[in-house]
Image: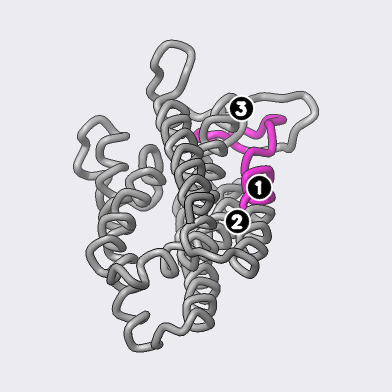
Amino acid sequence: VWRGRDSVNTAYVWLLLGALGAGGLVAGGMALQAGLSARYLSRLFAGVLVGMAVGARLGAVLGAGGEWRAFLRPDWMMGSAHGALIGALVAWWFAAPGRDRWKIADALASGASVALAVGWLGMLLHPVVYGSLWRGGMLLPDAAGIESARFPLALVASAWYAIVALLLVGIWRVQRHSGFAAWVWLVAFGAQHALLGFVRGDAGVWIGMWRVEQVIGVVEAGAGLLMLAVWRWRLQRH
């Protein structure tokens, strides 16, 4: 039910905070099981969260065409997911020591999957990021509050990341070398943007027939697949 933009945005922000909390608990629990100290992890995760938040808002500014007012508006979403990824990667690279870097990456990847699974459910409350018109879809409002049958983009993306989270936890339990789960997550993250970009109904920046986030997603998935191939090659050599 459409309740007005202010109440929707407030609920959406609280759901995002809950998603971050859920993801942080999963990542922290996995990192603790890997033998890392709680004090060290609290400092590292705080740095990653700051990097992610700053990256998300800078990405939103770029997605809004350089409109700096988007920086303080968590409801401005375009570009924020990839910006958050870049910000988190920069913070992780500088904050995590070399010997533990990939253990932390695997834990963060699993936590990010949980956070995204919960966060995408929050998109059901957001009138900007919605699926394209589809006769068999859900009744969802657009930015003007007009309800129409739309592709259930948020539910599909949430289910996608829930499955990815289970997959990564399984990989993490059986892998012999750290890092594999993190690269699998990057493939899944890029593939989600590339594939579900075809059924998004919100406004976007286009390159020909592709949305910009789809192009970035293809690059991310390709980079992840390349690194998985390198990872496998190194294992075979050793």
Mark closest to the chain's N terminus, 2 or 3: 2
In the image, residue 70 lies at what x, y percent?
27, 44
Q: Would residue 11 be visible to someone looking at this image?
A: no
Position in image of residue 40 (x %, y %): 32, 83
Q: Secondary structure at mark 3?
A: helix
Which residues are drawn in magenta?
Answer: 141-161
Contact check, label 2 and label 3, Cβ < 8 Å: no
Residue type marked 1? Trp
SS under mark 1: helix
Spatial CA distance of label 2 from label 1 is 7 Å
Q: Quadrant of residue 140?
A: top right
Residue under label 2, please give it. Answer: 117
Disc number for residue 160: 1
Tell me the SS state at disc 2.
helix
**Tag of residue 199:** 3
- Graded by Cα atoms within 10 Å as few (under 14), some (14 to 19) or many (20 or more), the crowding at tag 2 reads many
The CA distance from mark 1 to mark 3 is 15 Å
Residue in view at x 31 percent, y 63 percent: 92
Q: Position of residue 123 (x, y in %)?
A: 56, 48
Instruction: Name the amino acid, label 2.
Output: Ala
Magenta region includes residue 216 = no
Q: How many marks?
A: 3
168 to 199, vertically: above or below: below
Circle 2/circle 1 CB separation < 8 Å: yes
Q: Is residue 134 left or right of residue 71?
A: right
- Front-most of residues 31 and 156: 31
Q: Which of the 4 image quarters holds residue 139?
A: top right
